[in-house]
Image (cartoon, rainbow, N blue to C red):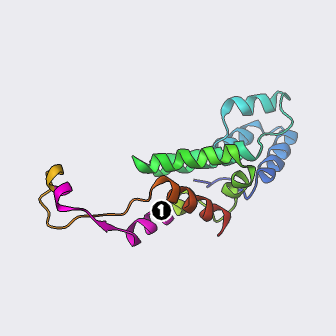
Amino acid sequence: MFDKFGEFDSYEGINELAENLFNEGDMGSLKAMAEENGIQEEVVEMYMQGDLPMLCDPLTAAIGKIEVEAGELKPKAIMEDWVEYLKGQCMENEEIALAVRGKGRSLKGCIGELIKWSFKNQIGIDKDILKAAGVTASRVTLGIPGMGRAKKIIRDYYMGK
């Protein structure tokens, strides 16, 4: 995922390398580094033309990392909702965006925390609901967190709580 340039701990690190690559005239590596970090091609072009003072800000760096990780994980169903919520939080709160970019924090780890909570908090499903669903199993449990709980788990994971 971050094989060629490594995982950056901050948007500043991305910008520092971008500036160095730009100053060296190594536009190929600049484009490759930006792609590896999920920074849109249009943004890279604007940066290389001098229309932007830096390649990314905290939000661009965070969303880029989430996009790259989601591309690898290919989340489905409720997990897609969790990813979209995380993106929204990055847009609303720069502190979250900065935390998302931090080393040691990943979408995989975040979803892992949500799944861990889900397994620890399974509840039995009423037999009448099972019958209405056409489920013939004698016992079914479910443990998906509601959005309020999921939001807290996501914030706590990225903020290190």
Under mark 1, the amino acid is Leu
Give whichever of 60, 143 is nearer the camera. Answer: 143
Q: Which residue does the image show at 68% across and 43% down from the upper left?
A: 91
**Relative to 133, 108 lies left or right:** right
Give whichever of 114, 3 is nearer the camera. Answer: 114
Query: Majority secondary structure of the magenta segment?
Result: helix
Which segment did they paint magenta? Answer: 111-130
Q: Where residue 24 sits in the image (x, y, percent)?
A: 86, 42
Q: Where residue 66 sits in the image (x, y, percent)?
A: 59, 48
Q: Where residue 120 sits in the image (x, y, percent)?
A: 40, 72
Give whichever of 115, 143 is nearer the camera. Answer: 143
For the C terminus, give its image quadrant: bottom right
Q: Which residue does the image show at 72% across and 32% down from the upper left?
A: 43
Q: Judge whether 18 appears above or below 111 on screen.
A: above
Q: Where residue 77 sits in the image (x, y, percent)?
A: 39, 46
Give whichever of 28, 95 is nearer the camera. Answer: 95
Residue bearing the label numbered 1: 114
- Viewer can see residue 18: yes
Corner quadrant of residue 31 = top right
